[in-house]
Amino acid sequence: MAMRDSITFRLNGETRVLHNVSPILTLLNYLREDAALRGTKEGCAEGDCGACTVVIGELVEGKVVHRAVNACIQFIGMLEGKSVLTVEYLQAPGGRLHPVQQAMVDEHGSQCGFCTPGFVMSLYAAYISGQPMDADSAPDLLAGNLCRCTGYGPIMAAQTAIGNYPAPDWEAARLEEEHRWLTDNAHGETVDFIAHGQRLLSPASIDDLAACYAVNPDAVLVAGATDVGLRVTKAHRKLETILHLGRVRELQTIQRDQGKLTIGAGVTLTDAMAIIVEIFPDFGEMIRRFGAVQVRNAGTIGGNIAN
């Protein structure tokens, strides 16, 4: 079993290789305190308000998938081989705003502004993923972002107006560079990271996972951290050994065969919902109320539901 003792990810186009940080440092705290990227805000520190929304990009079957997640309950140790995009990255090098940002300005979608970066990043994730940006999609797309002063009318108007702006001419090159980086940095090695008295094990195969668990049976299992994250941010627990399941592709498979549907424990609620609603349409309406987009993008069947 090949091992690595560092955490490598891409932040706003730059490679970050971390050695001496706690593996359960939240992405939010890393961004604000270590990376000096303070556009990402802390509102609740429990994945409810969306003020800390960022976009995570990862390679899935050769393609880059972008998803909005809550940085306040994402551990830094979960980012191996991934790309992180924050609100500071959206604008052009010369300062011209991205269409998502410009629409928020033009439609008066911000008042105090504290929640605005989170809304922008939720919209951005949908924008670069080619999701519908119409009025019908707004309630679900923005359900994980709370605003206490502007009111949602102008924000939803901004969402529907985004399509009226020309595509940013700087974005295609950025996305190509991101795809190339994710491809070049994909690997099957297990990350074994120790810092500040805490250990993170992040295997990339089911066999390596079994080997790690056999010698660390008391490790805390973490997939999306929508549950475990609150043990750190709210209960202030110091988790000594963490076994991260998020890179084990065998746990993320969905198989449909002869009337039987098999869903891996590491499948996110978002991915599970996509196929389940084809069989049980009413289930889609129910799971929309189970968790907002950011939670469904990170939470898994085996962790968030079955745990």
Image (tube, grey):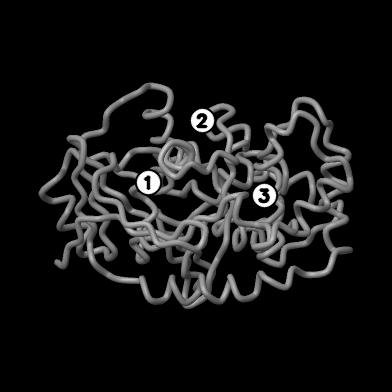
State which quarter of the image contains the C terminus: top left
**What whole-number distance in Å separates the C-alpha atoms at marks 2 and 1?**
16 Å
Q: Residue furthest front?
A: 94
- Tell me where residue 193 appears, x and y as whole percent: 21, 50
- Label 2, on which residue? 46
Q: Is residue 98 left or right of residue 272?
A: right
Is residue 108 in view?
yes
Residue type highlighted by circle 3:
Ser
**What whole-number distance in Å separates the C-alpha atoms at marks 1 and 3?**
20 Å
Comparing 201 with 301, the one in front is 201
Q: Which of disc 3 and disc 1 is earlier in sequence?
A: 1
- Tell me where residue 267 appears, x and y as whole percent: 46, 57
On the image, which quarter does residue 291 sit in?
top right
Q: Crowding near pointer 2: few (<14 within 10 Å), some, many (20+)?
A: many
| Looking at the image, residue 136 lies above or below residue 60 | above
Q: Crowding near pointer 1: few (<14 within 10 Å), some, many (20+)?
A: many
* Residue shown at the point (38%, 28%) measured from the top left: 231
Q: Which of disc 1 and disc 2 is earlier in sequence?
A: 2
Determine the secondary structure under disc 1: helix
Q: Is residue 236 left or right of residue 44?
A: left
Residue type highlighted by circle 1:
Ile
- Label 3, on which residue? 122
Q: Is residue 124 left or right of residue 47?
A: right
- Tell me where residue 230 appears, x and y as whole percent: 43, 30
Q: Nearer the viewer, mark 2 or mark 1?
A: 1
